[in-house]
Image (cartoon, grey):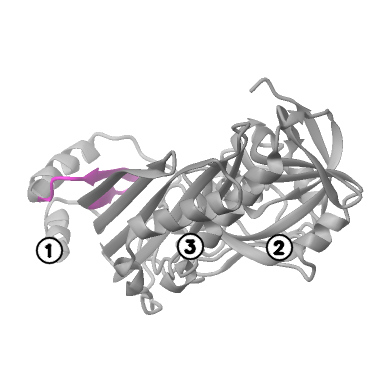
Amino acid sequence: MDLEKLMNKSQNLGIDEASFILEEREKRQVRFSNNDIDISKLWLEKSLGVFISKGKKVFMTTIKNLDKAEELLEKYARILQNLPENKDFYGLNPKRQSYREKKIDYGILDLELENLAKDVIDGAIEKGAIRAAGVIYRDYVKRKILTNYNSAEDEVANVDIVIRAFNEYRNAGQEAITTAEAKELEDARSIGERAGVIASLGGEPKDGKEGKYKILFHPLAFGSLISYSMHMASAFAVDAGMSFFAGKIGEKAYSEKLTIYDDPTFFSTGHRVFDEEATATQRTPIVEKGVVRNYLHSYSTAQKFNTETTGNAGIINPNAWQPVVEGGNKSYQDLLSEIDRGLFIVNLWYTRFQDYRNGDFSTIPRDGIFYIEDGEIKESWKGIRVTENMQHIFSSVVDVSKEREKVKWWDEVLPSYLPYVLVDGVNITRSKL
């Protein structure tokens, strides 16, 4: 695919600006259930992301049949003429960019996913689980981008492992990790062991009780809260009135223990060299010691907010690449010992917001809910719901652990690097699930 040829054609068609992203993807999947591998798949895909504009009229799509790219571009140019203007579009970033060198661990491509699956299964069973199920993905992507002003290339590879281990009462423990470094999977067995330990500790869970508790969130559980929050750190969400960050730039709104970055420069699964309009990515502080510092911007949203792009295009709707929460000085065991009456929660499902602007939400803990008294696990629970407000959660962070984990889980948890997080006064209600 000749992107230069496509750019020339777009100009001949009267298109003002264009961004073309050519993506080649090789994705492997190994799925396992009842302690055995049952599916192994390989997908080979090529696609072309297309964004074109004429004045403030914009059109975007993805082309799967690359042989028809030029023909389809002619069609899109005609469609563009008849579209209404987008008042929030201010053009693509015209500034010349300099990029970091791409970074990839090719050792990821040599890993045998079937062997990884066997290792995590064996680890879970060794620690007392009766059965294990889950999935392993390897994603290898090459990207090229060309706009009227810049061009760049990137290449990334990562492995995601999700395992749920079950005890005799069908109570589960879960781990969901991600990495771009092969060396971090040399002891894949330990991933299964951690899930197996959680399942074994769970025993036969009891019905949880409503109330307000001090809660230690596992990185996977806090990852769900952070990932939804990062969507609302987008300037588009702020402008749309769907963000609890709105109007808080420069304000100490949250606990001084909380520092959140979007950091695609950190080498892990969310590592990116450029965004969707070829702006070089950067490490952007969202919250520093409780103070809201930035929203996530594309060139257009930055123009509207009278600031600089943060390299997070989505051209119309900026997005986070890789949330990172700064760690603390205590171990997670230290944080656990500080709980006189509370919970340790491993994972959250079905996080839903009732009010985006204020941050009201509810979510269901699963795959490890433990009641804590005087720093010790007394029993496991089921059937509870976290019914809360995100601003209250962020304001009530007591401390964060020095240990951090690279987590990712479906679309629920973005690739993230997060500590264990201790939060006080969390509202727990009963769930029907």
Dot 3 amino acid type: Ala
Q: Mark 2, mark 1: which one is toward the viewer?
A: 2
Q: Position of residue 121 (x, y in %)?
A: 47, 51
Dividing the picture into quadrants, the one containing residue 34 is top left
Residue drawn at x 15%, y 65% is 4
> Which residue occupies the foreground of this view, 237 or 397?
397
Instruction: Label 3: state its secondary structure.
Output: loop
Residue 4 is one of the magenta-drawn residues = no
Looking at the image, do the residues carrying marks 2 and 3 touch, with CB atoms under 8 Å apart? no
Q: Amino acid at mark 1?
A: Asp
Q: How far apart are the alpha carbons under marks 2 and 1?
A: 43 Å
Q: Quadrant of residue 343?
A: top right
Spatial CA span between label 2 and label 3: 30 Å
Give the amino acid at mark 2. Answer: Thr
The location of residue 301, given as percent across then percent down, is: 50, 53
Can residue 318 be seen from the camera position used here? no
Q: How many circles with numbers are drawn on the protein?
A: 3
In the image, the segment drawn in magenta is 47-66
Binning the other alpha carbons within 10 Å of mark 1 as few (below 14), some (14 to 19) or many (20 upward) gives: few
Question: Mark 1 or mark 2, which is nearer the start of the sequence?
Answer: 1
Going from N to C along the chain, the mark reached first, 2 or 3, is 3
Asked whether 418 or 39 is in front, the reply is 39
The reply, left or right, for residue 183 in relation to residue 67 is right
Res 221 visible: yes
Which residue does the numbered mark 3 point to in the structure image?
188
Near mark 3 (Cα within 10 A), the count class, few <14, some 14-19 or many ≥20, is many
Q: How far apart are labels 3 and 1 at the CA level?
A: 41 Å
Magenta segment's dominant SS is strand
Residue 1 picture location, percent across and down: 12, 60
Q: Which residue is mark 1?
A: 2
Tell me the residue that label 2 is attached to: 259
